[in-house]
């Protein structure tokens, strides 16, 4: 590794650095001058000084250590660090590998980075945030969190190396974008204009003028907007006090929060909550949410609608805002008061999903939660708690009645739920339609199905592993189009001609029930669908 002088002028350097594989090995956080430091010579090292003064020797070359300095240490380098005991000390030591493809295919070797010893960046707060987040994830001792820490490290290395090699000069627009991201991620923290200007590497006045020219708001106005949008989310989804909500989004007290909220929306937080309880302008972004709303007697004001979930005949006044995905322009134009969708709350939202929150408070029904919790969550937001309780009581009574009838008719006979798609077959497990048949109706699943949570794709020859007494045929990944209708019918014909299929117990005894024509009416995970499945099961199995 070349360590003296400026970055190599090799025109291929940028390409080489972008091709290497970077692997974070460990992070050590030191907060005292007398903590011993020793460079692990088997890999690269990076010293990031938040606070410190002293000197650093690398292979005999001496450098002054000051706050916000970064040093690169090559494998095998002789390093000596001496810090002044009368100055606050706070620094990080990151160990990492930089690997390149070796001549022998499938193997890797240590790469030469050709970096100078000392590095400087105008985005030091950005790097510090990334390092602190990496440190937090590493402490969790979770394999997935460790993977995320390594991804953050690669993002940091990417920004650092781009700046060093001047591959692309960080212009004003990028600097402001960095502060926008910082506000989105850290809106609850105490943030000043000066903090943001320092992050952008600009003077406070010049940063403010440039920000307003680009964003059409001052930095602090933009930050307030983020906090208000986050507060709207919490107001509709939480029963926490206004004081707690105000502090959780970055306001100093509930009175200042209330003034800012009323200035932005024209009503107090209390009035806003009451408005949401009686709003009929609810937009549903997928079938799961639509089914739950309809079970509560609420026809969505706007919804994503397609033939994959054929309930359009039940929606008389709903505005269509898209087929498979919401059209943002239409969604903005209809101005909903509330947006309901399903997803995984723990996952990072896409840029498009983040825009939903700017249109209206967005409730995400966690995919991994029970459909009953989904129903009760929506009911709590729109003031329909009693309706939800009554609905669930009626549902449970119906399920118990049908369960008793099925028990006396088919006893412990096993039922397989087989999905048919475009050249695809799957076995449905304990979720979706299985939630009702195996869960609420207590029907017996074949042995191999009991360990399938959602579904498992199979070949026709694997059907003998699930030789059930009865088989229910349903759709698998039907997009609602006539083309998919034809493809699924073709797959069903191939299945009926398969010898493994013909030898199954349920097929030989004529106990196969087809729901393919209903598309996903009976396979969506929502309250309305599950109530329809109860009726369908009664019709199919007791007729």
Image: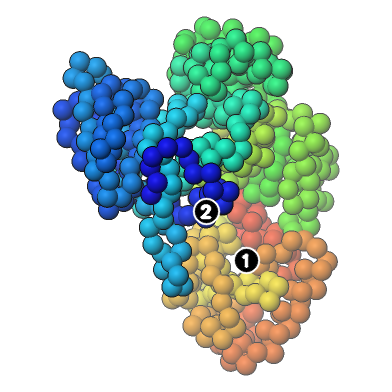
Tell me what residue is drawn at x 55 percent, y 82 percent: 463
Q: Position of residue 404 (x, y in %)?
A: 51, 64
User: Which label is found at residue 16?
Assistant: 2
Q: CA distance from mark 1 to mark 2?
A: 62 Å
Does dot 2 land on a helix, a strand or a loop?
A: helix
Query: Dot 2, crowdedness within 10 Å: few (<14), some or many (≥20)?
Result: some
Q: Which of disc 2 and disc 1 is earlier in sequence?
A: 2
Res 541 → quadrant: bottom right
**Depth check, front residue: 181 or 442:** 181
Q: Position of residue 476 (x, y in %)?
A: 66, 67
**Depth check, front residue: 442 or 76:** 76
User: Which label is found at residue 537?
Assistant: 1
Does dot 1 land on a helix, a strand or a loop?
A: helix
**321 on left or right of 339:** right
**34 on left or right of 424:** left
Tell me what residue is drawn at x 42 percent, y 37 percent: 5
Tell me what residue is drawn at x 46 percent, y 11 percent: 252
Can residue 308 be seen here? Answer: yes
User: Which label is found at residue 513?
Assistant: none
Which quadrant of the figure contains the C terminus? bottom right
């Amino acid at each position: 590794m070349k360590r003296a002088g400026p970055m190599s002028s090799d025109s291929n350097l940028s390409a080489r650095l972008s091709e290497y594989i970077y692997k974070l090995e460990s992070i050590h956080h030191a907060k005292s001058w007398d903590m011993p430091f020793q460079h692990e010579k088997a890999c690269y090292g990076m010293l990031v000084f938040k606070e410190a003064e002293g000197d650093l020797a690398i292979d005999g070359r001496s450098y002054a250590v000051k706050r916000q300095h970064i040093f690169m240490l090559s494998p095998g380098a002789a390093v000596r660090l001496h810090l002044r005991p009368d100055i606050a000390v706070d620094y990080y030591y990151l160990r990492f590998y930089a690997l390149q493809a070796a001549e022998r295919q499938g193997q890797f070797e240590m790469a030469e980075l050709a970096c100078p010893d000392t590095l400087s960046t105008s985005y030091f707060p950005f790097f510090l945030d990334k390092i602190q987040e990496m440190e937090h994830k590493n402490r969790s001792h979770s394999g997935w969190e460790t993977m995320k820490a390594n991804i953050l490290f690669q993002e940091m290395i990417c920004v650092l190396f781009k700046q060093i090699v001047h591959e692309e000069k960080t212009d004003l627009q990028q600097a402001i974008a960095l502060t926008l991201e910082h506000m989105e991620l850290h809106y609850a923290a105490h943030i000043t204009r000066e903090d943001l200007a320092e992050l952008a590497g600009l003077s406070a006045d010049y940063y403010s003028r440039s920000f307003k020219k680009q964003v059409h708001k001052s930095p602090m106005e933009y930050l307030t907007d983020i906090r208000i949008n986050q507060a709207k989310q919490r107001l509709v989804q939480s029963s926490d006090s206004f004081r707690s909500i105000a502090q959780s989004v970055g306001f100093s007290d509930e009175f200042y929060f209330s003034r800012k909220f009323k200035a932005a929306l024209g009503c107090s937080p209390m009035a806003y909550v009451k408005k949401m309880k009686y709003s009929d302008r609810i937009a549903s972004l997928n079938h799961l949410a639509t089914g739950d709303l309809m079970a509560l007697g609420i026809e969505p004001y706007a919804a994503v609608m397609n033939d994959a979930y054929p309930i359009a005949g039940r929606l008389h006044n709903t505005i269509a805002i898209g087929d498979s995905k919401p059209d943002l322009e239409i969604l903005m134009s209809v101005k909903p008061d509330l947006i309901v969708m399903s997803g995984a709350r723990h996952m990072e939202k896409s840029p498009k999903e983040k825009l939903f929150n700017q249109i209206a408070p967005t409730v995400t029904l966690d995919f991994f939660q029970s459909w009953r919790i989904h129903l009760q969550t929506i009911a709590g937001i729109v003031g329909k708690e009693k309706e939800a309780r009554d609905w669930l009581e009626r549902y449970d009574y119906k399920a118990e009645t049908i369960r008793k009838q099925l028990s006396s008719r088919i006893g412990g006979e096993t039922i397989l739920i087989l999905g048919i798609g475009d050249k695809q077959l799957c076995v449905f497990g304990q979720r979706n339609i299985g939630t009702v048949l195996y869960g609420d109706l207590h029907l017996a699943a074949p042995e191999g199905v009991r360990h399938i949570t959602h579904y498992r794709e199979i070949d026709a020859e694997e059907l003998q592993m699930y030789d059930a007494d009865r088989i229910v045929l349903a759709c698998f990944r039907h997009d609602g189009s006539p083309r998919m209708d034809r493809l699924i019918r073709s797959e069903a014909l191939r299945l009926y001609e398969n010898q493994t299929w013909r030898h199954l117990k349920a097929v030989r005894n004529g106990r196969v029930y087809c729901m393919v024509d209903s598309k996903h009416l009976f396979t969506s995970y929502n309250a309305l669908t599950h109530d329809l499945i109860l009726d369908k099961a009664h019709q199919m199995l007791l007729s």
